[in-house]
Image (cartoon, rainbow, N blue to C red):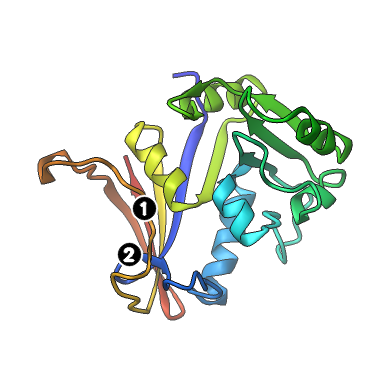
Amino acid sequence: RGLPFVTLKLAASLDGRTAPATGESRWLTGGEARRKVHALRLAHDAVMVGSGTALADDPDLTVRNLGAVRQPVRIVLDRALRHSPDSRLGRTAGDNPVWMLHGASAPGAARAAWGAMGATLIEIPEAAGRLDLTAALSALAARGLTRIFSEGGGTLAGALVRAGLVDELALFSGGALIGAEGHPALGALGLTALADAPRPHLREVQALGPDAFTLWSF
């Protein structure tokens, strides 16, 4: 299809929540699960998050404690370039690659600030006030990326599933119950019937200390 292979990573409680209503999410899963996440990052060309996750978590998105000799490209889908260049990603853009995918409406000052930090800026067409995800993935493929590890958050995850752009799902289940007031792991899919629900195929089940890892194919 001319698009990268996309692995969607979700980490959720047993009832499908990423955090309680307060937003506290460290740590939902234990050390063995987090080490597995880093190994999966290393197996992909790039790690991708949405602007909401970047703003909420100020992530680093590097591979740590595995002796990695290379780091994946770190990608943020940020239509208006709201994420600050004075973030972990911005301050380390000169050391490990950061690609900011933005829309035509992104302010010139924000573009210049990210460029000054060493980030690569890629303008993506917009559709209904959002970045066109198919166009975004096509742009990444054109730049040589073949495997993308999407880590966040629920809004981006739901949009990728709705668009049929997810090839496999890496699900980490933490042994906790959070309840309906918590933040859902997956954004709205717009389903009106159970028959329309995506049904990936289970490929792998693994216990990781107190947590469980399952790998699913679409």
Q: Amino acid at mark 1?
A: Leu
Instruction: Identify the residue at horizontal 33%, vertical 36% (top origin).
Output: 162
Residue 117 percent location from the top left of the image? 86, 41
Query: Which structural element holds mark 2?
Result: loop
* Residue on which the image places disc 1: 186
Q: Quadrant of residue 101?
A: top right
Residue 159 percent location from the top left of the image? 40, 39
Relative to residue 113, is residue 11 drawn left or right? left
Relative to residue 158, is residue 194 drawn left or right? left
Query: Which structural element holds mark 1?
Result: loop
Is 183 in front, or is 82? 82
State how far apart marks 2 and 1 are (Cα): 8 Å
- Going from N to C along the chain, the mark reached first, 2 or 1, is 2
Residue 199 percent location from the top left of the image? 22, 45
Is 23 in front, or is 167? 23
Q: Amino acid at mark 2?
A: Gly
Residue 136 percent location from the top left of the image? 55, 26
